[in-house]
Image (cartoon, rainbow, N blue to C red):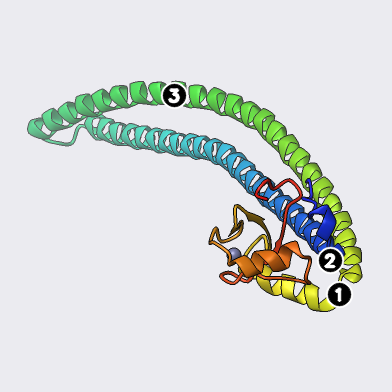
Amino acid sequence: MQTAIPRGGTVLAEITQLLELQATDGQLHEFSIQIDRLRAQQKQTEGRIAKEAAAVDQLRERLSQLEHESRMKNLEVDELDVNIRQYQERLDKGIISFKEMEDLRAKIVLERGRISTMEDEALTLMDTIEETKQGLERAIADCDEKTEQLRSQIGEIATRISELQAQAAGLTDERAALRERIPSYLVQQYETLRGSSSEPIASIQNGTCAGCKLKLSGSTIERVRGGMGIVTCEHCNRILYVDEYDSDD
Ligand SMILES: [Zn+2]
């Protein structure tokens, strides 16, 4: 980040240092924004991994439901089979009336019909189970592959975060050293102002404060131009300086 240089004739070393401090704080803020953004990306990527896994779980759940249905169907077929055998036994013993025999025969026909329908359904169900199993295998392979890709993305993001953190730590050290060189009353003033504004050091542009954009009084401008100590904006209290490149002369 380029630090503006206060006007040569009235350079106040303090202003230069404060501008450096402000630039450093700006950079640190940038780092923290970037790190936050990367962390959000990481979280989003983790969400995608969870979504992939959830899709597989859903398929697995569906398969186990189908298998349960299949077992139930087979049990029902077995029960019907038992019924038919019991009817047949009673018929074979033959100690019942003709009417009862007719009823039993009708029941046997009916139950056989039901068994036949159920067996067809069971076969269809077996096909569905087989397809679902294959689908699940594909989904698992797919999920594994995507998860690996996403994990590697998360790793890259983590590396980037570490790099930024290291850079930020270096800059924080530089800031501390810089802070040491600035008179403490100025640092305090700067930090108080920074509580309400990200850039407490403002240049004078066209007779106005670049921070609050309000017109400054002639005497304020004169005091800044004359290098008469630290001068603040009468509206927003920002510390003022005259930019070397400002053509408003
Ligand atoms: Zn102002």
- The residue located at (9%, 30%) in the rendering is 98
SS at mark 2?
Answer: helix
- The residue located at (73%, 45%) in the rendering is 245
Q: In screen coordinates, is 243 left or right of 178? A: left
Residue 197 pos. (x, y %): 62, 64
Q: In this figure, which residue is indicated by the disc labeled 3?
A: 128
Q: Residue 75 or 19: which is nearer the viewer?
A: 19
Q: Quadrant of residue 66?
A: top left
Q: Is residue 238 visible?
A: no
Q: In this figure, which residue is indicated by the disc labeled 1?
A: 183
Q: In screen coordinates, is 172 left or right of 87? A: right
Q: Earlier in the sequence, mark 2 or mark 1?
A: 2
Amino acid at circle 2: Glu
Residue 123 pos. (x, y %): 41, 21
Q: Looking at this view, name the residue that lies furthest to the left.
A: 99
Is ligand 1 less than 8 Å from the beta carbon at label 1? Answer: no
SS at mark 3?
Answer: helix
Amino acid at circle 3: Thr
Counting other residues with Cα less than 10 Å from the Cα at mark 1, is it few (<14), some (14-19), or many (20 or more)?
A: few
Amino acid at circle 1: Pro
SS at mark 1?
Answer: loop
Q: In this figure, which residue is indicated by the disc labeled 2?
A: 14
Q: Earlier in the sequence, mark 3 or mark 2?
A: 2
